[in-house]
Amino acid sequence: MEPTGLLRPRVSRETRLLLATVLISLAALWVLARMRFPDRPVTANPVPPLLTQLEPQPVFDDLASEVFQLEPKIVPALVALGVQRAGPGGGFVPDVVPALRFQTELAVAFLGTAPYSTIDGASFIGRDAGSGLAVVNVPPSGAPPPLVWLPQRLRYPRYMIATAVSPAGVSLRPVFIGPLLATDSPVWSAPVWTIPPEVVLPAGTFIFTTSGAIVGLVFEEAHGTVIVPADTVLAAAERLLTVEQKEGGTLGVDVQALTPAIGAAAAVAAGVVVTWVDPQGPAAGKLAPTDIVEALGGDAMSTPAHWRARVSRITSEETITIRIRRGGETVEVELVAAAAAAAAPADRPTLGLTLRARAPLGAEITGVEQGSIAARTGLQVGDLITRIGEVAAPTPAAVNGAFAALPDEGAVLAAVTRGDRHLVVALVKP
């Protein structure tokens, strides 16, 4: 008897196993692709681009064409900013720094903590003395600000795009960035990313991804080079638009790190040690060498870097509370900051001396800036200034004050001891 009805073809067991193996392999390939390339977007249908995602990232030579394609996307968001900044030999020298547009007519740039006189072609809005970040007005542009990079895995090594500037404008170059490590910063309000020491990038460089998203700003910390995340930089720029700019202040205090031996002797676990107090400064009679500063204005002082970052943001006549450890007791002292010394006019050499007190003898020279008035006069590291003008055994503040009080083209005589020799020099103010 003939069978009736349609016969369903039978799929062999081997075929079913093969199909199951293919499906499992595709799923495994997709999972591996997501683990290998977490920064790439997830597609709705993962099957077609699987092989594309598994391809290796472009090598350095291949990135040249990618950089060329990225220029129309990134360069309009950047400005080559001409500035006049303090030079190592005194006076001011021209420089060019990159600035990133974050609004139609506003850009943010790193100017450093050294004094500067002018910003060519742009008006100054505000500057953070602690980080050296500045906001300036720039010619309007219709270019939208770049997207901010949100990393999924910091420790994954990758190529990125770094900015370079010259008087001719802004250019881009690929750079290999190794694993990034998040670490706290005494300067910034959020963690920064430490980059390997073999990656050489100048401070102020903006970093982008190979897709054109802004990664952040290169910055020099005490422990090495870091990238400040873009959202932290932009948040700091927005704050500068709302903070009133005031004259910088000083406390007239030098500090050093708290060593284990000093900490054990003072029974203190953390802080910085006062090494010098300006006898004419705000802290005179209130702080003394060997005091341990535990907090300044409510902020813990763990290292000299924390101290410098906090003190750099003090304004003239600001009242600030310092918590110190002295003789086994904790004491709080209020100080009113004095006005910081103004920067010298452009192209005018400065005295250029770094001094430390050598009581009761005078002020010892620990540094002489190249091209400064002190260098031209012949002063050297190790010289001891025993008298300046009418002041015997002057403090460092007295030396600087005597020179600052001179009129233009005025001069003051200084007695100097150099080893077993005794000299007199004339410091002339141009």
Image (cartoon, rainbow, N blue to C red):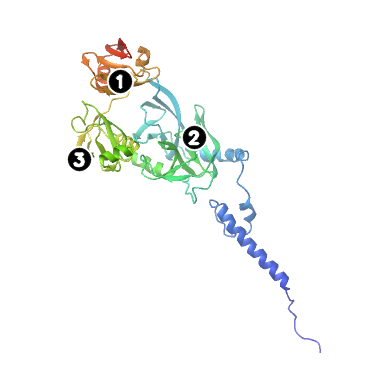
Residue 246 seen in render: no
* Residue 92 position by quadrant: top left
Q: Which residue is mark 1?
A: 364
Q: Is residue 130 left or right of residue 144?
A: left
Q: Which residue is mark 2?
A: 201
Height in image: 240 above or below 21? Answer: above
- In space, the residues marked 2 and 3 are separated at their CA atoms by 42 Å
Viewer-nearest of discs 1 and 3: 1
* Residue 117 position by quadrant: top left
Q: Position of residue 319 (x, y in %)?
A: 21, 37
Whichever of labels 1 and 3 marks the residue nearer the N terminus, that label is 3
Amino acid beneath label 2: Leu
- In space, the residues marked 1 and 3 are separated at their CA atoms by 31 Å
**Which quadrant of the figure contains the N terminus?**
bottom right
Q: Which of 35/213 is in front? A: 35
Q: Position of residue 415 (x, y in %)?
A: 27, 12
Q: Position of residue 422 (x, y in %)?
A: 30, 10
Whichever of labels 2 and 3 marks the residue nearer the N terminus, that label is 2
Could you tell me if the residues under marks 2 and 3 are in contact, i.e. CB atoms within 8 Å? no
Which mark, residue 332?
3
Q: Which of 199/336 is in front? A: 199
Q: Residues within 10 Å of mark 3 (few under 14, many from 20)?
A: some
Q: Residues within 10 Å of mark 1 (few under 14, many from 20)?
A: many
Amino acid beneath label 1: Glu
